[in-house]
Amino acid sequence: MAPRFGYRGREGVDSRRNVLPELPTTLPHDIRKEISWVDYSNPVNPLGTPKQYIQAMHAALVDGELAYRPDMSAYALRRIIAAYNEIPIESVLVGTSTPSSIRNVVQALGPARVGVSTPVSIDHELAVINGGSDFIPLRNPFSFATCKYYIAYREINRFDAAILSNPGFPSSRLLNEDVLSDYLENCRWVIVDESYLELSLGGESFIPLTKKHENLIIIRNPSATFAIPGTPISCIIAHPDTISRIVSYTDPASNGLATEVLASVFPQLMGYLDKTHDYLEREIPWLQCMLSLIPGVKIYPSEGNFVLCRFDGGNMDLGVSSTEELSIRLQLAGLLVPQLTRITGLDDQESYFSIAAQRRDKDQLLLETMKKIIAR
């Protein structure tokens, strides 16, 4: 297992910065322990952090390994990622968050006019801008699947680099290899964000293509795969010659103890991933079906561990009239389902929300609560 087109540069992003929501996107630290919150906005592994990782991290802390300077080259994790993907270790870099890795690549390979498949997190948009390049949203006018290169190029007129997702957040759609091939043929470089690939339904990685395409860069996100978002770890995978250009723009000091701990238990986590795949293959179709039965909720096809939804009560007499009201009512019940206000490329973004799969009992709790709220 494994809207319209348009160009917006720095001026557009500056204006977005001024209208970002004042409310925090995560729970304030001072109230996280006061309420048993269930967060459906963070698409990490629904099975939770593996016990092997927790035990290894605990042992490392007890043994005083924080007193030692970690291997800033993250050699252990790079070696094991390379071995599992049958690529040379020189093809792997380790960093922190996905946006920071994207920014590093853009800085190293830019400046460029970067076409970015939308909808996409504003963090990706800012990574492009802060990396010194121009952000050009590429939106498929017919669906949330990645727009074909020739349609995008004709509508936009010109871009010479691209960032695509496999699958995208919050669209939850996988990338087609034929679509990627056209971008690789016509762009100086292409980043494919595979942060949630291990949590997708039948998704295949494009890492093998890096052996013959020097302009292809893959981003992976072990923090999402292994449910450890508190210790952000991402990997940049590309042809060795491309990595050699990127490495000078990365900060090796960001590689800490967490990368070494993950490397030490990585072989033990394959069974955990098998259980994750088996669970998601059952849970995501079930979750989509159940959400679609709730009045006013429209769902979009999902190929990842999250479901893009839209609330529109229309002329129905329902308990809430908007996604904002639904989100507030759910939050009062201890369930976090925020609006997608930090997403670029959604018309009427205030009406959309995304549900990340959780354990079945938690998903049932969400569905039952939504029904009660919406049905009065």
Image (tube, grey):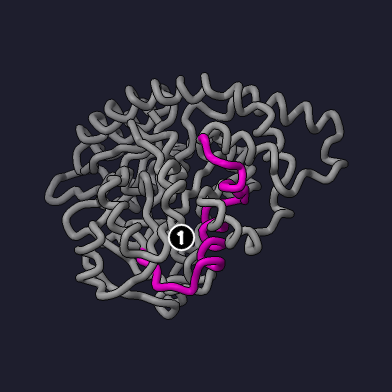
Image position, residue 321 (x, y; %): 25, 51
> Which residue is outermost to the front?
212
- Residue under label 1: 124
As helix, strand or loop, the secondary structure at mark 1 comes to helix
- Seen in the image, is 54 located left or right of residue 102? right
Q: Nearer the viewer, residue 316 or 45?
A: 45
Examine the rendered structure and indicate whether residue 44 appears above or below residue 216: above
Image position, residue 349 (x, y; %): 31, 59
Q: Residue at x 61, y 50 (%)?
A: 96
Q: Residue at x 43, y 39 (%)?
A: 40
Image quarter of the N terminus = top left
Quarter of the figure with residue 137: bottom left
Q: Residues within 10 Å of mark 1 (few under 14, many from 20)?
A: many
Q: Is residue 230 magenta?
A: no
Q: Nearer the viewer, residue 237 or 221?
A: 237
Of the residues shown, which amino acid type is indicated by label 1? His
Q: Nearer the viewer, residue 336 or 256?
A: 256
Quarter of the figure with residue 228: top right
Examine the rendered structure and indicate whether residue 116 appears above or below residue 218: below
Q: Nearer the viewer, residue 19 or 99?
A: 99
Residue 297 appears in the picture as rendered: no
Image position, residue 319 (x, y; %): 25, 43
Image position, residue 63 (x, y; %): 85, 29
Q: Residue at x 26, y 48 (%)?
A: 178
Residue 289 appears in the picture as rendered: yes
Q: Is residue 98 magenta?
A: yes
Quarter of the figure with residue 100: bottom right
Q: Which residues are magenta?
A: 86-115
- Seen in the image, is 224 located left or right of residue 346? right
